[in-house]
Image (tube, rainbow, N blue to C red):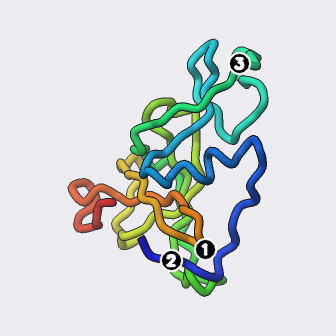
């Protein structure tokens, strides 16, 4: 994992720290409602589907489907020079859960809606950041994460 600098970090809170630090063991995690088993993101104190307050944390496969993306050709950060991809992905275990992320190790011209992507954690100022990498078999030459 490479150390990235010059990129803003999310603020940690008691409700979100598990999400922002879960990549230390290479596993992506989301909140889960223990009553209806729905995944919840962003983290919340109650389930948005059944209103239960019995909330836990669940590991997921780290695979998702690319549901929207844009390629930024302007305004980068020192560790994220343009062009870079900002994407929304639907998590395989519960497609209602959408994660906004970057797609890495892929030519942006090779991305297609509906494409499978896989989580890849990168070190960033002593924290891990979840980014997604496209599957080389579906993307015509993109590296997999």
| CA separation in Å, label 3 and label 2 | 36 Å
Q: Position of residue 121 (x, y in %)?
A: 46, 60
Identified at 71% across, 15% down, the residue is 50
Q: Are discs 1 and 3 less than 8 Å apart at CB?
A: no
**Residue denoted by label 1:** 125
Q: Secondary structure at mark 2?
A: loop
Task: Mark 3 or mark 2: name the one nearer the start of the chain.
Answer: 2
Side of 90 relative to 49 (left or right): left
Quadrant of residue 136 in the image? bottom left
Task: Mark 2 or mark 1: name the one nearer the start of the chain.
Answer: 2
Side of 126 relative to 132 (left or right): right
Q: Position of residue 129 (x, y in %)?
A: 55, 61
> What quarter of the picture does the C terminus occupy?
bottom left
Q: Secondary structure at mark 1?
A: loop
> What quarter of the picture does the N terminus occupy?
bottom left
Q: Secondary structure at mark 3?
A: loop
Q: How many marks?
A: 3
- The tag on residue 108 is none
Q: Position of residue 22 (x, y in %)?
A: 54, 48
Q: Are discs 2 and 1 less than 8 Å apart at CB?
A: yes
Residue nearest the viewer, comparing 11 with 62: 11
Q: Is residue 72 above or below residue 33?
A: below
Residue nearest the viewer, comparing 115 with 49: 49
Q: Is residue 44 above or below residue 99?
A: above
| CA separation in Å, label 2 and label 1 | 6 Å
- The tag on residue 54 is 3
Identified at 23% across, 68% down, the residue is 141
Identified at 72% across, 23% down, the residue is 47
| CA separation in Å, label 1 and label 3 | 33 Å
Task: Mark 1 or mark 3: name the one nearer the start of the chain.
Answer: 3
**Residue denoted by label 2:** 3
């Amino acid at each position: 994992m490479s150390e990235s600098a010059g990129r803003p970090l999310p603020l940690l809170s008691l409700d979100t720290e598990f999400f922002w630090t879960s990549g230390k063991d290479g596993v992506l995690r989301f909140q889960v409602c223990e009553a209806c088993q729905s995944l919840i993101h962003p983290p919340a104190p109650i389930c948005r589907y059944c209103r239960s307050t019995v909330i836990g944390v669940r590991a997921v496969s780290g695979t998702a489907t690319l549901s929207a993306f844009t390629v930024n050709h302007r305004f980068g950060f020192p560790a994220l020079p343009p062009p870079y991809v900002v994407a929304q992905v639907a998590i395989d275990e519960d497609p209602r859960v959408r994660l906004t992320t970057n797609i890495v190790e892929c030519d942006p011209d090779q991305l297609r809606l509906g494409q499978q992507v896989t989580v890849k954690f990168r070190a960033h100022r002593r924290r891990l950041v979840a980014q997604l990498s496209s599957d080389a078999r579906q993307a015509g030459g993109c590296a997999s994460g």
